[in-house]
Image: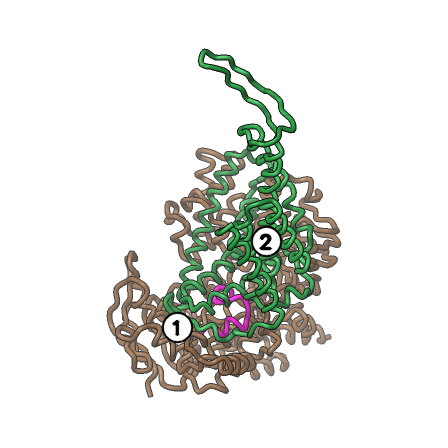
Amino acid sequence: MPTLLEEFLGVRLGGSPYLRLHSVTRITVPFLLSLNVLFAKDLPSVAAICFLSFALLLLSGAPLRVVRGYLALIASVTIFIALAFMLFTKVPGEVLWELQLLRVQAEKGVWEWSIVVTDASLLRTLYFSLRILSMIFIATLFIATVGDRDMLWGLRRLGLPAGVTVGASLFFRGIGFFLSDFAVVKEAMEARGVDFERTSLAKRFMLYANALIPLLSLLVTRSFEISTALETRGISPGTRLSGSYHSAPLSRGDYIVLGAVGLVTLAFAGWFVCG
Amino acid sequence: MRVVEVRGLKWRYRGSRAHVLKGVDLEVEKGELLAVTGPSGAGKTTLVLALTGVIPQRLPGEIEGEVRILGMSTLEVDVAEIARRVAVVFEDPEIQFVMSTVEDELALSLEARGLPREEIREKILWALELVGLGEEFLERQPHQLSGGEKQRVAIAAAVAREPELLILDEPTSDLDPQGKEEVVEAIESVRDSLDATVIMVEHEPELIERFADRLVVLDDGVVVMEGEPQEVYSRVEEAKRHAVYPPEDFEVAVQLGLKPPVRRELLELAVLNTPLDGLCSFPRSKGGEVVVSARDVWYTYPGGVEALRSVSLELRRGELAALMGPNGSGKTTLAKVLAGLLKPARGEVRVMGRPIAEFSRLELSSLVGYVYQNPQHQLFCQSVFEEVAFGLKLRGVRGEELERRVTEALRFFKLEELRDEHPFFLSKGEKRRLALASVYALRPELLIVDEPTTGQDRRFGEQLMEILRRLADSGKSVLVITHSVDLALKYADRLIAMNGGRVIADAHPLDVLSDPRIVREAKLKCPLKAELCAIAQRRRRAQP
């Protein structure tokens, strides 16, 4: 089954041992890892989480070009974090470099504004940047290995009503409908003479606002048709679906992976609470 | 045993001025296959919703009369309870597909019944086999299925529940001829295997004649004709007044003054040199100046699907060309390439002799107009007037000139009275006419119309094709993508048949449709009229 990565970006993964794991495992592992990012309190621990997430990402067979797209984002966020710690605050520690930008001598004293690079500010910048990097690895691991079907059956096994599970399915299908409808509406405007590339920003905004009319009208029509079709199949928002149809057992590999990641999470949680 | 009993059913949607159903009386016996037909907007789908209990339980409005299904009153028994014994297949196969795979789709309603895993699996496989789809379809996703396959999945999902009453609401109207045939076979198989009562809302007379035990014609919310299909269709003029067009052999027989149905006799007449008075007159184009030409055009979609492969053609003034072929054959892609909405990977497209790339978007859209299959995609203004004026305003048309041109377009498409209405509140047919008017107002030299008659009754199809014929006769060039061979034969002067991204035939509709090889390859069907006229033509040629 295609994963979210394939559905949204068209990136298809080759087979890998990680992908053969049960959907419960593929959903739970990123979830636990993301908890660990919250629990990690210092640089070595966050570096370990980052390494672990990256290793799992490699194991899953996800192409690194997906992550490469986020490098610019990571770099710019890192710069902002660094500026925040060096330009606007003074993080206590050994001063490695300092540059005074402004010095105001007033009646009540002196006010100074400097760029101060301390060893602690560098470590904090690295710590936060690694947390962001870890989150990107984990999110990529999730979308590269989990499909909408995995999530839907997961929700059903939880015994949630059809209003939630079928609603979630329709949400995923709706994204596809919305994107293709939007592309057609935009093309239909072009077919009547609109040139988006040569249109001013204000005019373009108005055109996109106009595009909402057919999109909303399609949304209303489709919602009515879908809900009618579901009602006539005996499925109303309160219907309980057992989820029994797709209830394959977990394999030994699943238990090992879940156990290992679970232990790591327990350790981090314990350290976070008690340490 | 009576499965359906409808007594004096009247229904008015909340906020609507008029009743949609104005006193329907209907009875259906166990094991019967009842066909319901009538013009668009007659209340057919509303009747279906009333038979399932969705009306009045889930939709707001006023009801009078009574509906009893399998002894259950829809006023008293909950929709979910009725749904345990009644299954419905709707018109749009895309919308009905709720889950992401065929297997999940079929499992959905079975799981809601709390059946064990093995039984669900067994029923899924049985239902799939019944509609002619194998186990290999289980993992398929909606986008991997053709229209016909999707509709067969919808039928399988309905049949898997083993309903006592199966309702099919225009199950073939969105499909190409091949898809229709697939669905027809599935219905045939279901009918043979299940002892279910079936109600089928349908426009296709051939389908009704083939399957139905009884036909009910609904018009303006009341039953206006009822009887065996042959009996109803033999009242040709009365049926046509209600937008019910009989099967082709009935029509041809009446035209020749014979007693229908006489398919074999008609063919014998043609072979025996009998003059087929007035039957074989078809539109012919004089062939004017070339408006758009394509030479060795190739197009590949980003996913790698090769949609066009070395297509070359010329479209001239005064022509009404029908572009036909199965779904996925490249018709819409070719139309979009000709309209400059897609850029070919290879080859050249010229408009009025100039390469298409030399035109700005505004210039090009003034020469080549494109009307989309779903009019909802191209109506984005606040009123009918504004919609038609949109393109003109972009071109700087203002004041009296704007008023005059918009009014002319609205008059041409009979929309004058609706000029201040919001497009959202128009009927399907009106939306389609508005979409055409908004492009027509720009006075393009070539008008491309994508499947304008899909899902509409035959009367609407005829009216629309008449308008397009008039446009072609006035010197414009018109290209219509359609699945209707009857309309193509009657109104077009040229038929371009495609398959696998290639043009496999390009000639007069009569010549294309009477060539069995092309008909087979382009997955078309040969209308009786084409068959008769081709025989007459061959006979004439053979005469010294």
| Vertical order, B365 against A102 (above or below) | below
Which residue is tagged 2? Answer: A138
User: Counting other residues with Cα less than 10 Å from the Cα at mark 2, is it few (<14), some (14-19), or many (20 or more)?
Assistant: many
Check if residue B94 falls in the magenta segment. Answer: yes
State which chain is coloured green. Answer: A
Q: Secondary structure at mark 2?
A: helix
Left or right, residue B46 beside residue A65: left
Left or right, residue B358 beside residue B143: right
Q: Colour of chain B?
A: brown
Check if residue A212 falls in the magenta segment. Answer: no
Give how far apart the Cα atoms at labels 2 and 1 are: 39 Å
In the rendered image, residue B169, in percent from the top left (x then y), is placed at 44, 71
Amino acid under disc 2: Ile
In the rendered image, residue B273, in percent from the top left (x then y), is placed at 63, 79
| Vertical order, B228 against A139 (above or below) | below
Chain at tag 2: A
Q: Secondary structure at mark 1?
A: loop
Task: Please identify the dominant SS of the magenta region.
Answer: helix
In the rendered image, residue B458, in percent from the top left (x then y), is placed at 47, 66
Chain at tag 1: A
| Vertical order, B357 against B89 (above or below) | above
Question: Between disc 2 and disc 1, whose residue precedes?
Answer: 2
Amino acid under disc 1: Gly
Which residue is tagged 1? Answer: A234
| Vertical order, B374 against A209 (above or below) | below
The segment highlighted magenta reads B92-109
